[in-house]
Image (cartoon, rainbow, N blue to C red):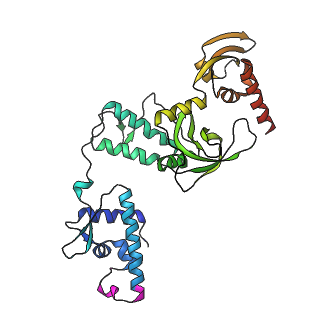
């Protein structure tokens, strides 16, 4: 039975870390079970065994180079040296692969815990949880930062919850990290159909419980913000470098807030059905009962408010300003046509 790649990489890492001296490629081939099982021990007989042995040596060399690169990408520091016989050899010195003592205060531990909870609905949920547990076990977390009972972490009575349910979240997060352009289909709130967008992703921001992507839209040659729930179909990565400069984090965050409607420049008056629209009520500057099951609210008015109000459907009626009322009606008509 073939040995899994993860086990092969672990055995190679342990061999390099446990060796008392640098090991050559030939010695590693003979020492690691996965290599022996696939290519043989690589002894003198195999080296002189003709064309088949040569092909086996070349295949092993390619696999070894890939494995070595994978371990380096995972953070293992592997030094390439020349041994006493003048051969190329490899070693992973323990002092080069040992982290300094880590100690987090209560505020840092809390921030780390909140960041890990972003992955509650994503593929890396178990990895994030495991990392926190390892930090706690190693003494890097302050007492009580990760309370445990019966071997399981117990959550507090009040705990922030950051959902990441959209299928586009993980590929976009990786594209932001690796600075890779992406292509996806996107349906605007006032559009009946999706359209293809080519984007250089900058960052993801969670705002009012929704995730947004800020980036450079190549088709429109301008910065744009996309709500992940409106991305239809898969997100596909593209090769090549970014064409536009990436702004700093503060600027990107302001862009997300502005395009999502956070930057209010004036106020608007709306009618809101009783018992509906709690997020709108939470932001209201003033509230007045109208009777017949309706309230009148004065709320901050900025870019993107029309798109937000449309989501409440028949529970909201815009009173003023007139341009906001017209924008909301146009969006509702577009949705009805779709």
Tell me which corner region of the image, top left, top right, bottom left or bottom right, holds residue 69. Answer: bottom left
**Residue 60, how many percent across, how many down?**
39, 75
Q: In this orientation, does residue 207 appear?
A: no
108 left or right of 244 in image: left
Expressed as whole percent of the image width and height from the top left, the position of residue 299 reads 63, 17
In the image, residue 36 sits, relative to residue 126, either above or below, namely below
- Quadrant position of residue 189: top right
Towards the viewer: 163 or 147: 163
Report the residue at 59% width, 46% height from top: 199
Is residue 49 on the magenta stretch? Answer: yes
Q: Magenta stretch: give its range.
A: 41-52
- Residue 7: x %, y % from top left: 38, 64
Q: Report the front residue among 154 and 12.
A: 12
Q: Is residue 33 left or right of residue 237?
A: left
> Does 40 sit above or below residue 158?
below
Residue 20 belongs to the span the image colors magenta: no
| Image position, residue 150 (x, y; %) | 36, 40
Foreground of the two, 10 or 185: 185
């Amino acid at each position: 039975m073939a040995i899994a790649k993860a086990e092969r990489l672990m055995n190679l890492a342990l061999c390099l870390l446990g060796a008392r001296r640098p090991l050559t490629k030939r010695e590693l081939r003979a020492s690691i079970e996965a290599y022996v099982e696939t290519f043989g021990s690589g002894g003198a007989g195999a080296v002189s065994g003709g064309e088949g042995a040569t092909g086996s040596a070349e295949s092993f060399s390619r696999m070894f180079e890939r494995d070595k690169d994978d371990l380096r990408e995972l953070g293992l520091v592997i030094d390439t040296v020349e041994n006493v016989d003048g051969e190329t050899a490899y070693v992973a010195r323990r002092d080069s692969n040992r982290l300094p003592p880590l100690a987090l205060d209560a505020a840092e531990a809390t921030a780390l815990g909140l960041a890990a909870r972003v992955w509650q609905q994503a593929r890396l949920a178990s990895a994030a949880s495991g990392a926190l547990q390892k930090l706690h076990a190693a003494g890097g977390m302050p007492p009580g930062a990760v309370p445990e009972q019966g071997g399981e972490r117990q959550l507090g009575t009040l705990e922030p919850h950051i959902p990441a349910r959209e299928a586009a979240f993980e590929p976009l997060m990786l594209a932001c990290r690796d600075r890779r352009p992406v292509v996806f289909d996107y349906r605007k709130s006032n559009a009946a159909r999706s359209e293809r967008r080519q984007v250089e992703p900058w960052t993801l921001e969670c705002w009012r419980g929704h995730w947004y992507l800020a980036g450079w839209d190549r088709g429109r040659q301008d910065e744009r913000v996309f709500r992940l729930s409106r991305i239809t179909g898969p997100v596909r990565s593209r090769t090549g470098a970014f064409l536009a400069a990436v702004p700093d984090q503060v600027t990107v965050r302001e862009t997300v807030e502005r395009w999502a409607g956070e930057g209010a420049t004036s106020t608007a008056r709306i009618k809101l059905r009783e018992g509906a629209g709690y997020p709108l009520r939470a932001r209201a500057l003033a509230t007045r009962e109208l009777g017949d099951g309706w309230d009148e609210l004065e709320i901050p008015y900025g870019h993107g408010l029309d798109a937000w109000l449309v989501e409440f459907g028949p529970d909201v009626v815009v009173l003023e300003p007139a341009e906001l009322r017209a924008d909301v009606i146009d969006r509702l008509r577009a949705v009805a046509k779709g």
